[in-house]
Amino acid sequence: MPRPARGRLGGALGLAVLLAGLGAAASGPQTPPPAPPTPPQDPQRPIFRIEANFVRVDVFPSADGVPVQDLTADDFEVLEDGVPQPIETFEHVVIRPAPLERVDPGSGRRMLEEAADARNRVFVIFLDEPNVGPSGSHNIAEPLVRLMDQILGPDDLVGFMTPGMSAAELTLGRKAQVFEEGLRGNWAWGMRDSLMPDETEQHYEDCYPPLPVAEAGLLRSRLASEMIARKRERATLEALQDLVWHLGAIREERKAILAVTEGWLLYTPDPGLTSPREDPELGREAPPGIDPIGVGPGGKLTRGDPKNSVGGLLKSDCDTDRMQLAYIDDQQFFRDILADANRNNASFYPIDPRGIAVWDSPLGPERPPTPEQDYANLRERLDSLHELAINTDGIAVVSSNDLDVGMRKIAADLTSYYLLGYYSTNTKLDGRFREITVRVKRPGVDVRARRGYRAATEEEIAAGRAAAEPPDPGAEAVEAALGALARIRSDTPFRINVLAGPAAGSGGVWVAGEIDAAAVRARGFAGGGTVDLVASGGGASGSARVSLGPGERAFLTWLDVTDIGDRLDVRARLAPAEGSALPLTDAVRVGTGAGASRALLFRRGPTTGNRVQPAADLRFSRSERLHLELPVGPDVKPGTGRVLDRAGQPLVPPVEVGTRLDEATGQRWITADVTLAPLGAGDFVIEVTVVDAGTAERVLTAIRVTR
């Protein structure tokens, strides 16, 4: 069963906006690499060492919970897959807090370089907004501030994240004062048990109100309450997984994630959620599914009863989420996160800010569960926190009314460690995971250390060397890419973008289309429409038809074309599904000039309902995230990505480059993601490097940021 789409079920939460602003203010104008907003792609980018077989291991030895600080290299033994490894480098690192000496990285690239430095520790404070109550968020403010004062050294990097944020928005800096002030001034960030739903949750409540008799007196129906709880839990777990992947991509050594949370119930599939509800007065509801065909004003056929729509969404949208949420398996997902954390050398330090909790649920205003069920829920939440810490070599701070005591344990655990290095005797570049075991010869010493790493492949080493020093793309290449922006016209409500050339294959082209949001209703396309595509030129020909459903604003389709030559004209005509509105048209000439495209573009933001949507308009808002996909052959590898200004100079926002495989067609895609918030209005070029047989090639795509 696929996971629920994060765009709808993961919704952005309030504190994310606060933390995004505070992170930018605390660490300068840089912004971090964005997380992938499109179909699954490789979770980890290759990490290249100076020597392919050199491995660093961070080790945290302790005796009776106290760090051991007088060990030597001779006291350690390191094994890789059970084979002893000679220790080549040894360093005992002791951190001394120095709040006045912290200097932030000056750019996004510098931030990533410093995060990759083994001697610079990396911390992420994860505030689990939907699973922390207001009292807990109040309790943790000052202890958390004091902890940061105790553990942060002059070279440490710290970032802050909530489930409403993407790991893409994570900014690592050294000055935490702005966040500390925000934490003190906005302590009531916890949303657990809140009756203030977000837009999607409100839609659930409207779709499934309490049954008059069966659920009399409830503010929310039991169905809506469980859907909201499942949605929030899955949003948190998805954010944690994204964070682990992201940190593993930018740093090989240990990462400490301090998760402020009251734990999770780890929901499992419950087919009963999909069963029709029954009430003595209302009877049995219709099974979840597609809304029936109805009759609208003027006798027009409509999909569903207009009375059964909320905020422009039909009950079938609720039913879709209901089916997905009913079959999530968060227990398995949680185990996957633990495995990902170990592979990516990330340790969790969960902190329950409630102190000693007697009851899991409040006594009102909603009706609480039975005492037996409440106790079972409380144990499940606490067990999930213990399991998270134990399986990732962290420390759980739970069931304590003196949070500072637990914070001091974390501080002691993180302020002294040993950094060992060795050249692996296994020199194979096979990409396999290799298990690391660290032992201390002194009796009575417990050891927590990195559990393993993934070996590089020959292709990754070649790609890393080819992309290590990206050359200047040249003013002429940048200017040619910017020429594509000449097609932008503010009075064109319908646009297409065509991907042609050798990368798309000789048998056709990809066509993306997009309608302005304002034109959907103003021009009579709210009910959808039909797009007719025709390709011609130089003996080539091809046609296709695409249908747009009600409310749909974009499409992406493959157009079969015979005898593609040096030039191809693609024309599109969009006719409304209903009414007499005039059709909308657009045309693109594809060749080797400015109209050519090497990438498909996608957008994600408020105007798309936080869903990924194909983009044909080259204009983007600063509130959106840009996603590009380049079709490549089976042997082509991803390199690096950069944002360039009109002069070809690199800018602050990093570009996250990865790969995706379309299993249905076998087509491989190199992907790139950029968060546009740090950019001002203007024209920019996204540079993506692809590596084929050790040779790097740069693909330039121009965009315009409008506001």
Image (cartoon, helix red, strand yellow):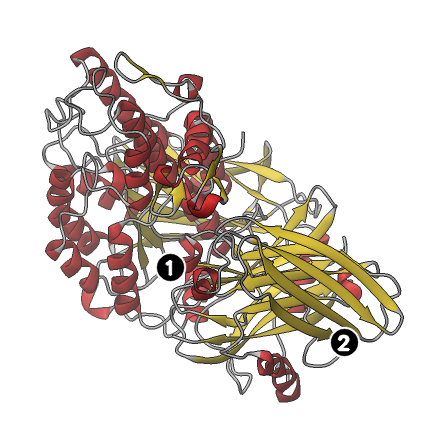
Residue 430 location, x and y as percent? 70, 44
Residue 492 location, x and y as percent? 54, 74
Residue nearest the viewer, comparing 103 with 65: 103
Q: Amino acid at mark 2?
A: Gly
Q: Are marks 2 and 1 in contact (CB under 8 Å)?
A: no
Which residue is denoted by mark 1 in the rendering? 120
Residue nearest the viewer, comparing 498 with 43: 498
Residue at coordinates 11% horizontally, 49% vertically from top-left?
Answer: 142
Rendered position, 278 above or below 116? above
Q: Indicate which disc, 2 or 1, sits on the residue closer to the N terminus.
A: 1
Instruction: For label 1, count other residues whose C-alpha is less than 10 Å away and answer few (under 14), some (14-19) or many (20+).
Output: some
Task: Find the distance from the CA under tag 2 to the CA under tag 1.
Answer: 49 Å
Residue 197 location, x and y as percent? 24, 41
Residue at coordinates 53% horizontally, 56% vertically from top-left?
Answer: 579
Which residue is denoted by mark 2 in the rendering? 591
Closest to the camera, between mark 2 and mark 1, is 2
Instruction: For label 2, count other residues whose C-alpha is less than 10 Å away and answer few (under 14), some (14-19) or many (20+).
Output: some
Would you identify the image quadrant in which residue 487 lies? Answer: bottom right
Residue 606 location, x and y as percent? 38, 58
Instruction: Label 1: state its secondary structure.
Output: loop
